[in-house]
Image (cartoon, grey):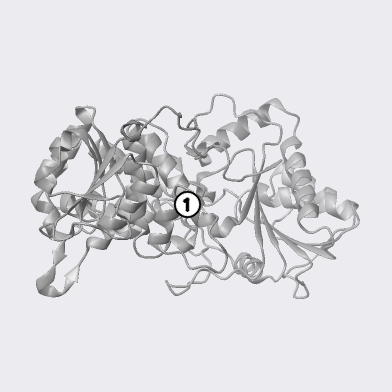
Amino acid sequence: MQRIAPHQPHPLFNTAATRSIEHAAAAALPPHTLMQRAGLATAQLAQAIAPHARTVWIACGPGNNGGDGLEAAFHLQRSGRQVVVTWLGDPGSTPADALASWQRAQSVGVQWADVPPEFLAAADLCIDGLLGIGVSAQPHAPIRVPDERLLACLQALRRSPAPVLAIDLPSGLDADTGQFASGLAPDAHPPHLAPHHPAPRYTLSLLTLKPGLFTAAGRDAAGQVWLDDLGVDAGHATPSAWLSGPSLAAPRAHASHKGSYGDVAVVGGEGLAERGMGMGGAALLAASAALHAGAGRVLVALLDNGHLQLDLQQPELMFRRFEALELEQLTVVCGCGGGQAVGRVLAEVITRAARLVLDADALNAIATNSTLHALVVARGQHGQSTVLTPHPLEAARLLGLSTAEVQSDRLRAAQQLAAQFNCVAVLKGSGSVVAAPDRVPAINPTGNARLATAGTGDVLAGMVGAHLAAGASAFRAASEAVYQHGQVADEWPRGLALTASGLARRVGG
């Protein structure tokens, strides 16, 4: 058993792959073996999480996830815990393995309760064995109609003052998408408020790690994730995605110079003086991030007639007229704060830039212009590195979908972007997804809600540009920049507000 921390890559397997691995293992092992291992692993982690718990309440569904919970009840009761089980099954219709675990739990004197107990305290423990991977949030999946007892158990788990350990997956969460199935989502919260969990959340993923634990709603729902492979090797199963790890780049050589790390040009920052508006800050944030992420030189071409010639806070930035940029020699980050003005230069940028990061208003322009779309596709055909960095709304515009449709399956949406535009796509958000044509996508494990503030996306675009300029492939540049971007937020000093400018200055630290 291992705790999953963001320091090394891990393969992720969707529901179909996990079931295939499970069926192959079950066929090679004596009956009930996998459930016995799962229940023992759950009991061991439960005791590590809450070593002094007086009562352990286990909510068990009617299927094999519930059987894992029943098996855990057997072990916890034998170890001297006071175990209370709410089981939604029926001995006459229960799978054979789950029935065997029910009988084992009965044999050691487990206490049974038809309704969730009301006496649990913060020192106790809840175990969620209701549904596991037995639900789907896919649009065309059969809709499970939850019964009242199941909903009561889910509500009790989500409101419990005691820590909650989910077996395999938090109940109701789709293993593939990280979204909740219809009728099983937590109570709605105002969009500006995070879901309120009164107690810590833990998830013990069994056999494999699932993509849904690390993206969309999965990160909040799963809490701290652990893995027990139950002694089963995944064999030749193909991962559905990878959980990204940190950069493995070698330290910089002493005998290097600024030319060794490439030149980044940031093109954006429309000025709207007649409307009392200016968006130069977005371009300067991207440029600052590129500088602090290690680019050898950073050039800035503002699309406001070039009125700014020097940034006194960052005199290292070199301001240029757009017409003076030698695009064929540069890694270009285009779109940050570009407004409508970016449309005037975008075709030239896409056609000429040696390496290219497209963000924000550049993406919005491409979404409505088939000629620009075709030019981006052509870059991939010519082997030119290109990275798109949309947030979900920008991704929806590019794909002709709604934001809800993008978020309903973030892995699929990122892969569609990569395939449609023949380039690397970074779908930003909780568990940012990095995808490329004909490649297994990556889900980023770093970052937190502190990044939900203006300008942090511009910082990421600049960081991707710096990694590209230093010679990384487009996929590697995107993956490493996204990981580093989130890691800085994770290490942010407690009590200090995270701002985009502060983030940019820390990315090289």
Would you say 387 lies left or right of 9 here? left
Q: What's the residue at 85%, 65% (across, down)?
A: 54
Viewer-side residue, 461 vs 218: 461
Secondary structure at numbered mark 1 = helix
Residue 446 spot, x, y in % from top left: 51, 50
Which residue type does callout 1 highlight? Gly
Residue 222: image x %, image y %?
59, 55
Residue 235, placed above or below residue 166 = above
Q: Residue 487 or 20: which is nearer the viewer?
A: 487
Quadrant occupied by the N terminus? top right
Residue 463 position in % (x across, y down): 36, 46
The answer to whether residue 383 is left or right of residue 4 is left
Which of 317 and 36 lies nearest the eye of the viewer? Answer: 317
Which residue carries the number 1 mark?
A: 486
Q: Is residue 103 visible?
A: yes
Can the viewer see residue 370 in this picture? no
- In percent of width and height, residue 276 lies at 15, 74
Q: Which residue: 53% across, 69% down? A: 195
Q: Quadrant of residue 384?
A: top left
Looking at the picture, does residue 45 appear above or below residue 16? below
Q: Residues within 10 Å of mark 1 (few under 14, many from 20)?
A: many
In this rendering, the answer to whether 402 lies above or below 21 is below
The part of the image, by quadrant, that contains residue 479 is: top left
